[in-house]
Image: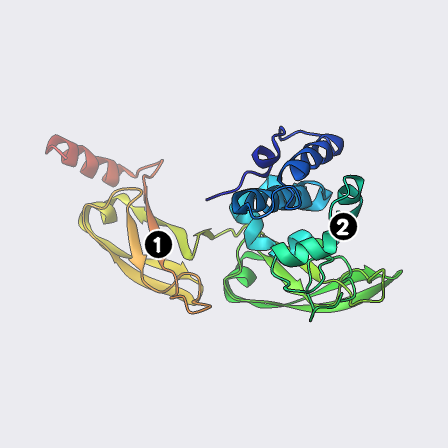
Amino acid sequence: MAKDYYALLGVEKGASPEQIKKAYRKLAVRYHPDKNPGDKSAEERFKEVTEAYAVLSDPEKRRQYDQFGETGFHQRFSQEDIFRNVDLNDIFREFGFGGGDELFSQLFGGRGGAFRGGTFHGGRVRPVKGQDLLLRLTIPFRQAILGGERQIDLTRHGHAEPIKVRIPPGVENGQKLRVAGKGASSPAGGPPGDLLLEIEIGADPVFTRDGNDLSVSVAVPFSGACLGTSVEVPTLEGIKRVKVKPGSKSGSRIRLKGFGVVGHAGQAAGDLYAVIEVTVPKKLTAVQEKLLQELRNSGL
């Protein structure tokens, strides 16, 4: 079931950071395990509002959540990402509750361990990882389909660093590619964060994409649409000639199985659809006009 973080905290989508913090403090006091010992429903509620606060209190996570919604957000952020660099000790300390690290360890899976920045490690605090960096990378349409390699210049520590990025075949618009260790430095001597590249795919003059399927417009003369013909269809692998059935209409599609987005991650390749556009000439020769007059007189 999708989670509406704003509804969980009882605030409007345009709520200020102060309103979000105030709403969370109120709910955290109500559902904190120290006040509800043994109450599993209160514990679950506390976990939900804490997750909501971890996202909405961080400007970048909140922007991503607002842009992609709950489902899209969780495709891009793991629980580790959500709770990274979250420190609730100050809030809990105000009310005399148990420390945030130990509590998070118990509630979010770190048995006997410590939690800070979303990471458990053998019952000890693992050095805080640096923040991830998010950049948008625009790639050509066909490279998104076929894959390849791109080089970007990333400015880190005051100088540009060339980085080669492998583009997997079939990457989708909005998908994030992770480059390990190329994010911000850790403030506490831990490992650096990662670089997240949000893919933006450029338009193509020939093809359009729907998931793993591609479409291309194919012009068919009026006579060919009536009587049947064959036409050349552009594909990613070159030109392929296909038959057009008699009586074809504009908008009808011819399926070329397996000629769409290449298969990846165990998925089958998509299909290519040739979309027929019946062309009608703007000017006719005298012979053509006479023949069409005869066809019209015959009832066509």
* Label 2 Cα neighbours within 10 Å, binned few <14 / some 14-19 / many ≥20: some
Q: Marks 1/2: CA distance?
A: 52 Å
User: Is the residue 186 above or below the residue 27 in the image?
Assistant: below
In the current view of this chain or complex, which residue is farthest to the left?
Answer: 298
Q: Residue at x 25, y 42 (%)?
A: 249
| Vertical order, 31 against 75 (above or below) | above
Q: In the rendered view, does 201 fall on the left or right side of 16?
A: left
Left or right: where does residue 79 sit relative to residue 169? right
Q: Which residue is mark 1?
A: 273
Instruction: Name the spot of residue 83 as percent of width and height, x first.
Output: 68, 53
| Residue designated by label 2 | 87
Quarter of the image with the C terminus is top left
Q: Which mark is first along the chain, 2 or 1?
A: 2
Total residue callouts:
2
Residue type indicated by callout 2: Asp
What mark, if any, has residue 281 been given in the picture? none
Q: Residue at x 38, y 63 (%)?
A: 259
* Residue 50 to residue 271: above or below: above
Looking at the rendered structure, the secondary structure element under dot 1 is strand
Q: Depth-wise, is mark 1 or mark 2 nearer the camera? A: 2
Work out whether residue 250 or residue 159 is closer to the camera in this orientation and state it.
Answer: 159
Residue 39: name its quadrant: top right
Q: Which residue extends farthest right?
A: 158
Residue positioned most to the front: 37
| Res 279 → quadrant | top left
Q: Secondary structure at mark 2?
A: loop
Is residue 113 among the parts visible in the rendering?
A: yes
Out of 90 and 162, give the one closest to the viewer.
90
Q: Nearer the viewer, residue 123 or 154?
A: 123
